[in-house]
Amino acid sequence: TLSGLNTYNFVFLLLGILLHWRPRSLLESFSKAMPSVSGVLLQFPFYAGIAQILTKVPNAAGATLSDTIAHWFVGVSSNATMFSFFVGIYSAVLGFFIPSAGGKWIIEAPYIMKAANVIEAHLGWTVMVYNIAETLPNFINPFWMLPLLGVLGLKARDIVGFTFIQLLVHIPLVLGLLWLLGLTL
C-alpha cells in the first residue's frame, strides 16, 4: 500500500534532501538534531531502499538482482563447504561498505539463503558464517566502538593502527576456520 510507514519515511527523507539541497547541509542538520545517533538513523532508510531494489525490481528476463547474485554463488561453489568460504569472503568485504550487521542482513539474506537452499548448505551454518565473517571489518570500521570513542574523545584514526593489525591476523584465521568447520557439516 502507498500509506505504509516506509512510504512516510521515504517522503520525509526525500523532503529533507530537497530542502537542504546539499548533502553536507543535511548531514549537519541531522548531527545537530540527534548528535549521538544521526549517522545510524540516516543509514537505515538507504539499506531498505537497496533491499527493495535487490528483491523487487526485475530485469528484462524477469529475474531480480537477488536471483542473479544467488545464481552466481551457486555457480562458483562446487559444494556447501566452498559456498561457506565464498559467503565468508563476500560478507567480510561487504562489511567494509555497510557497517551495520542488521543493515547487511536485510540486503544479503534474500540471495544468500536462496543460494544456500539451492546448494543444500546447512542454513544455520550459513547464518553463522555470515555473522562470523561480518565481524572482520569491525577491526577497521569500528561501529561497535562509536559510543566509547565519543566518551573518550577519540577519533577512529586514533585506534585504527591497532585494529588493522588485528584484522591482518584474523582474516586468514577466520576464513580458514570457516572452511575447516564447514567440512564437518
Image (spheres, rainbow, N blue to C red):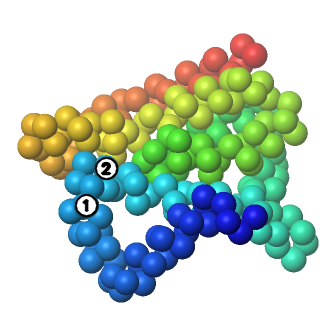
Q: Amino acid at mark 1?
A: Ala
- Asked if one can make out residue 92 in the rendered structure from this viewpoint, the answer is no
Determine whether 73 is above or below 59 in the image: above
Q: Nearer the viewer, residue 44 or 129?
A: 44
The kind of secondary structure element at disc 2 is loop
Determine whether 123 is above or below 147 in the image: above
Assess disc 2: are there few (<14), some (14-19) or many (≥20) residues with their C-alpha within 10 Å of its C-alpha. few
- Asked if one can make out residue 59 in the rendered structure from this viewpoint, the answer is yes
Residue plotted at (31% across, 56% down) = 38
Q: Which residue is mark 2?
A: 37
Residue that lies at the very extreme toward the left in this rendered image: 153
| Residue 116 sits in quarter | top right
Q: Position of residue 95 (x, y in %)?
A: 48, 47
Q: Nearer the viewer, residue 160 or 146?
A: 146
Q: Which residue is mark 1?
A: 33
Assess disc 1: are there few (<14), some (14-19) or many (≥20) residues with their C-alpha within 10 Å of its C-alpha. few
Report whether 71 appears left or right of 24: right
Q: CA distance from mark 1 to mark 2?
A: 9 Å
Quadrant for the C terminus, please. top right
